[in-house]
Image: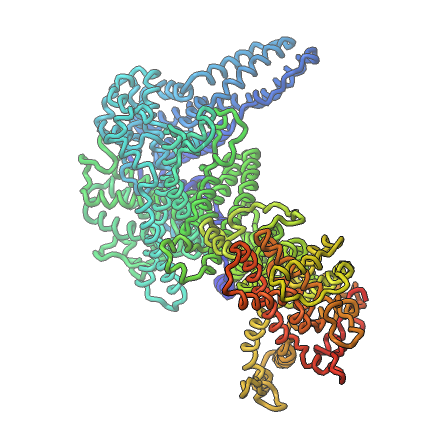
Amino acid sequence: MAVPVEEAIAALSTFSLEDEQAQVQGPGACVLAERGATESPIEYSDVSAYRLSLSEDTKALNQLNALIQEGKEMASVLYTYRSCVKALPQLPDSMKQSQADLYMETYQVLDLEMSRLREIQQWQASAASKLAADMQRFSRPERRINGPTVTHLWSMLKLLDVLVQLDHLKNAKASIPNDFSWYKRTFTQVSVQWHDTDSMREELDDLQIFLSTRWAILLNLHVEMFRVNNVEDILQVLIVFAVESLDLDFALLFPERHILLRVLPVLVVLATSSEKDSESLYKRVKINRLITMFKNDPVIPAFPDLHLSPAAIMKELSMYFQKFSSQTRLLTIPAPHELPPREAQEYPLIRNLRHYLIVNHIVSIRADHDDFTIRFASAMNQLLLLKSTVNADVEWSKEIKGNIYDMVVEGFQLLSRWTARIWEQCAWKFSHPCKDVPVESQETSASFSDYEKVVRYNYSAEDRKALVELVSYIKSIGSMMQQCDTLVADALWETIHAEVQDFVQNTLATMLRTTFRKKKDLSRILSDMRTLSADWMANTSKSESELHGGEESKGNFFFPRPVAPTASQVHCLQFLIYEVVSGGNLRKPGGLFGNSGSEIPVNDMKQLETFFYKLSFFLHILDYSATVATLTDLGFLWFREFYLESSRVIQFPIECSLPWMLADYVLESQNGGLLESVLMPFDIYNDSAQQALIVLKQRFLYDEVEAEVDHCFDLFVSKLCETIFTYYKSWAASELLDPSFLFASDNGEKFSIQPMRFTALLKMTRVKLLGRTINLRSLITEWMNKVFRENLEFLFDRFESQDLCAIVELEKLVDVLKHAHALLLTDLSIDSFSLMLNEMQENISLVSFSSRIASQIWSEMQNDFLPNFILCNTTQRFIRSSKVPLVPMQKPSVPYANPNFYCGTQELNLAHQSFARLHSGFFGIPHMFSIVRLLGSRSLPWLMRALLDHISNKLTTLEPMITGLQEALPKSIGLLPFDGGVTGCMRLVKEHLNWGTKSELKSEVLRGIKEIGSVLYWMGLLDIVLREVDTWHFMQTAPWLGLLPGGDGQVLHSQDGGDSPIVSLFKSVTAAIVSKPGCPNLTSFSTLSKQAEAADLLYRANMNTGSVLEYALAFTSAALDKYCSKWSAIPKTGFVDITTSKDFYRIYSGLQIGYLEESVQVSSSNHELLGDSVAWGGCTIIHLLGQQLNFELFDFSHQVLNVAEVETASTTQTPRNPHFVQVWEVLIELMKKARRLNNHVFSMLKARCPLEDKTACAIKQSGAPLHRIKFENTVSAFETLPQKGA
Amino acid sequence: MARAGGITNAVNVGIAVQADWENREFISHISLNVRRLFDFLVQFEATTKSKLASLNGKLDTLERRLELLEVQVGTASANPSLFTN
């Protein structure tokens, strides 16, 4: 069943083809339907159907076109020619005997290349003779045949251009004569054995002359042309045509404009070098007009890295053309490189310089671009609206389509102008190499290749910025126009059809009726124009009357038909208009249309001229996608064949490659506005690869482009990711800075970052690169996943190389990273942060509870913190002891990393560092918070367990030492007598407590007690922090669990036995949704309510957590149980043992007074070694052993203090030795301090681990205390504690 | 022939031109629609590619998550004693 095409296509639009990806690349694939209208697809074979007797002309035209095609291929062979000689091997001495073979081989290789050159030589000879013959044939004054047509003129110009280019290229390529001389040498070696080499030798000589003569092709052409002396006319016509087209500049796209500019000087040289009156040219074209033209465009691009200069060409050619050398005015135009620097400042050049550099135009280009984009989009919207309207008004539809046509014309002109600017800037840069290489480059300027001078250092940052901008404008407008190709095609056809019909049916009718009524010849031509292009059937009913003469004065109204005229129709129309205007006479003086002597009135002339140029532009519009492709092709920016040859290298490094320079610039500049153009330079590679394959047809060039693209893209991805990562890191870091601090600080802006948008780039899932599709997004994702892990790894490494105090810094940095991750997560789906953190912490396993940080903290505590840090009770901080540590710590050196592994930029790093430095000197509450947050509830218990085990281990190691000290204690020490005063007491103490042989155990024991004290105090800090965290959690969960504050600090449950608010909320939600019909997935809602119940249970269970400190004390107490009998002997008498007791408190008291005394003598050194934690350790053990009262009664320093008190009271009157007073007073001060500290510890312990009531119960009937009864002092958890080693 | 022009059989040419316009209308119509079809295919390919890419991204994430879970389950089942009590 047949479906109408229209409907079938319309049905396709119902598919949703939305795409997340932004358009940040140039047009991709373009579909070309036909060979293109500009070159007739059927080689003008339909021209004969119009019976205009143009068959000769058409034949000649096709011949020229074929030659142009061949010539272009020759030119690309020549341009891409690379020297073979450099690759030829040299024979080592040992193989000299096979020299002849090498010659043979070399000859064969070179022969292939040389045969190509020979081909070029032959081709140019035949092309020149054909072109000359063609010109002669069509310029006979008697005119036996029709022509030349305008298309024919164009073909002549194009062929001439190809010849000029070939010649220029042949002159510029130095490797060709080189290769040739090598070839000739091998030929003489090889040909010795051959017979009959004369013809070959002759051929060789010919080729040599051809290759070594500059401008050989032009000279040959000149000879061919002036064999018969009548081509001047046609040369003049060509010049006039070229000059007028250039002046008008409407219908020309940049490739044509460049062709005309290249050909013009050569044409002038040829025209003035003829035998007869060379001045006749200037009668038709004023010489000043030519000179201005040459001065305005002093450099013209010819090949990607090769340019032409009219002035230089004319100067050089004047040596070969005698006649021309008299044209002094043309010869004195300065060539661009000849201008002296002083003159360069003045009028013409400074204008040229400004004219050539894109920087000077970018502002207006930007405005043009913005304006055009908006208007084009709105025109497109109108068109879409029109298409969706049924029975649209004819006038309205015509207007909209006409508008589209105007927009397309404007777009083509903009694109053409912009791309031409890039070409011209390139040519200009090539002709003006950079004089002074920037100083920052290390190498000497001598080592710079020419290419670096013309490209790498020749584009300033401004130039690069402007170039990137312009390239992206060209590419974006190109892709915008390319996309709507099929949408606008019929509108364009319709408009063109209407224009043509309007002209032939209305304008021509008017002309026929008025101006040309009397002129039979001319009116015949005009009616021919109507015959061959009028589409009468598209008319309204009036067509009948119109066919027969057309008496109506009003214009015809016709229905548009979406069909465009064919190339042949346009060709014939142009020809006929040209005939009307020129009267078929080549020698007619004056210009084409600006003809004063013509019989045609000015008004009609104007109309004919406008239509004439419009016609040539129609063809470009009909070739819509081909034109867009040509105009947006920027592949030439990559090619550097000429410089490769002159620099004698195989390829330049990518830093010299313009596309990469641009991409690199965008990344380096950190310019948010340019960022989305970063993929545009890669379109240049796409274009150059296309050119290498399609135009130049060289596989090796494609391979080179491909290799460079591969390399560049890798580099690009890593640089881009680096930029993205740094940006997000700095963003996170600056957000985490305290805002009030930023507000108050003078240079707060330094810490804020320039916003950049990566969203478009992060969405690129298909980047088109040399026909491949690359998923940039997944590449970035991969890279980010990797780099986040690397960063975490680095942070942990860094922490491991520092001490425990760095935990605050670690937490800060992890926070920054986490925040950066959260920010990036909105645009990119990377692994979750907790996953990465667990992975890097080696904490993935379900059954392991330690983690990298936890074990690091533990080992740090064991090896550094506990032995080397001392406690200050007042500030609640641990600080590093100033004493040299006993065991020097072995730590890895701090690893190095880029600033973006810290906080992004240098400034932010400094800001965060100065914050971290505040916490680097001590360990206190903030550090404990960091530990709690970093370890979480998973690894914290593991750490606590390890620390508690440490306590019990310490106790085990202390036990034998304490026993030793007990043995060293004298049998009995009585209470200190008052009669000796402080001095006597101290003497007595010294006598008794010298510990005999065991005195070296003293410090060992003190350190052990200190470590136990430190651990306990650490637990105390942890307890404080956990309390705060728990309270915080409680406050958050309480309303959900339905807990209410009651009187007296009690917590009340809001509903008895009922559900908590969270459960009832979710239950009611589920019930409400289930009751509504049409709910898609009910199960997920019931799961939700189940999960609410689970959450309720979990949070409720977590509510009343015990105290960590109490648990630690209970654990210590349990660990002490083993030593209870040794350290706390029950007195045999049943009464308190005063003199002979060797209980722990006794030992500790002795140690304490010992070190207090030492502190006085050795200027407070012991305290710096031990700190306040000794008191914590000692007092805790005493308290847990139940000896607190004994200690307070019989402590030696206590006793000394009592004695001192009495002594002070009794001896206030008698003066004493001042030195003596000083010594004892310091000691007594210390003792008082120690007592205060001990009291503080005891009161704390009493509060947290009360023992008194139990001790009180343990007094015997007799009054003697029952020492150390077993008591249950904490909750049941204690019972289940697995004892170490048990 | 001194001057150009002068279509020898103007009426016939005129009729042929008229027929040509009509034939070409048909050809243009067909060729334009073929191009539209082609355009659609190109666009369809592009859209499909990006949809597949996003799907691929999601699958990647899932795969990695699954891998992690497998490892975790592996560690747990390697020590069954911890869970039998």
Residue A361, image x, y percentages: 31, 43
Q: Can you tell which quarter of the image residue A1193 is in? A: bottom right
Quadrant for residue A866, please give it: bottom right
Say whether residue A499 is left or right of residue B41.
Answer: left
Return the residue nearer the eye: A647 or A540: A647
Rendered position, A437 above or below A1157: above
Query: Number of callouts in the render?
Result: 0
Identify the residue at the far bottom of this view.
A1056
Q: Is residue A433 above or below residue A966?
A: above
In this view, the residue in front, A540 or A836, is: A836
At 33% from the left and 60% from the top, the residue drawn is: A400
What residue appears at the point 40 percent right and 56 percent down from the top-left corner?
A488
In what quadrant of the picture does the N terminus of chain A appear? Answer: bottom right
Residue A782 seen by the camera: no
The image quadrant where one finds the C terminus of chain A is bottom right
Q: Nearer the viewer, residue A620 or A930?
A: A930
Q: Position of residue A362 (x, y in %)?
A: 33, 44
Closest to the observer: B49 or A190? B49
Tell me if A934 is positioned left or right of A614 in this view.
right
In the image, is residue A139 above or below residue A886? above
Q: Is residue A922 visible?
A: yes
Is A694 situated above or below A829? above
Residue found farthest to the front: A1214
Q: Position of residue A1121 (x, y in %)?
A: 77, 70
Q: Position of residue A659 (x, y in %)?
A: 47, 40
